[in-house]
Image: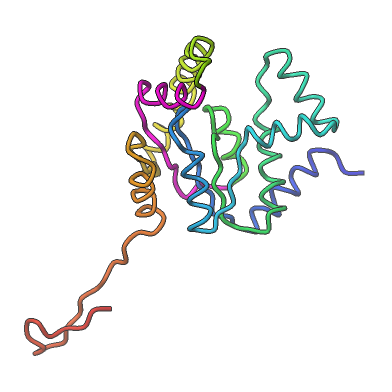
Amino acid sequence: MGTANDSSKDISVRLAEKKPKVVFVLGGPGSGKGTQCEKIVQDFGYTHLSAGDLLRAEKNSGSENGIMIQNMMNEGKIVPSEVTIKLLQKAMLESGNDKFLIDGFPRNEENRAAFEATKIEPEFVLYFNCSEKEMERRILNRNQGREDDNIETIRKRFKVFLESSLPVIEYYKGKGKVREIDAAKPVEEVFEEVKGIFNPPEVRKVVGGRGWGRGCCAIL
């Protein structure tokens, strides 16, 4: 009888064989990454996977795994990276696609190291950079009437993002894999920048034979 580890290994092997194209999407609360992910899905055919949504869905499923997640959250504990990664792997396999936006993950260095162990290397990290002041303004605007309740929570979330996720971004910057977007701009302007990353301009080669002369060449 196979163990849970065998099952996890099986998922990892099957996924590695699929050679998925993975893009990590990171940004603070209110950076607009969810809106941009929707647009990327529509224009470029990616499947959008939110680590937080997958955990919440599993928690609400009533499964053995879901009860464990619920108990950990109730106790204020962080769900182990392996649990989140297994949910992501399962969703990737079941999607039928081979291009994925993984939103809000890796949240910290432990997440990153655990994902690297799956042998899937992200193509790049899409980082929506936005000032705390602008993110705060956006969140308060969409939660009108509850400003006093929210402002402290927003600042705590931003602090957690800085402390946990920025080291991940710095790590991938060191590998030349971060594509940073100025997320303070209006939505459509931000998406124009995003499109340039997902659909880079073609590099054209200009060739010419001997004696072709200037202005007499072929563009490939």
From this view, report whether residue 49 is shown above or below residue 66.
below
Note whether 217 is above or below 112 in the view shown: below
Residue lying at the far front of the rendered structure: 145
Q: Relative to residue 55, is residue 144 drawn left or right?
A: left
Decide which of 204, 40 is in the foreground and name it. 40
Please state the horizontal and vertical placement of residue 128, each as a whole percent of the image.
40, 36
Residue shown at 40%/23% (left/top)? 137
The correct choice, above or below, for 31 with respect to 88 in the image is above
Rendering quarter of residue 205: bottom left
Q: Quadrant of the C terminus?
A: bottom left
User: Does 107 sit left or right of 178 as displayed?
Assistant: right
Residue for point 88% across, 43% down: 2
In this orientation, which residue lies closer to the viewer: 195 or 216?
195
**Residue shown at 50% from the left, 45% from the top:** 37
Residue at 35% from the left image edge and 21% from the top image edge: 133
Residue 213 in magenta stretch: no
Position in image of residue 79 (x %, y %)? 68, 24
Q: Is residue 30 positioned above or below 176 on the image?
A: above
Q: Position of residue 182 (x, y in %)?
A: 32, 37
Q: Seen from this angle, which residue lies furthest bottom?
A: 211
Q: Which residues are magenta?
A: 120-143
Pick whichever, 152 or 113, lies toward us.
152
Q: Residue furthest right?
A: 1
Q: Nearer the viewer, residue 44 or 17?
A: 44
The quadrant of the rendering that contains the N terminus is top right
Residue 124 lies in the magenta-colored region: yes
Is 198 situated left or right of 23 in this image? left
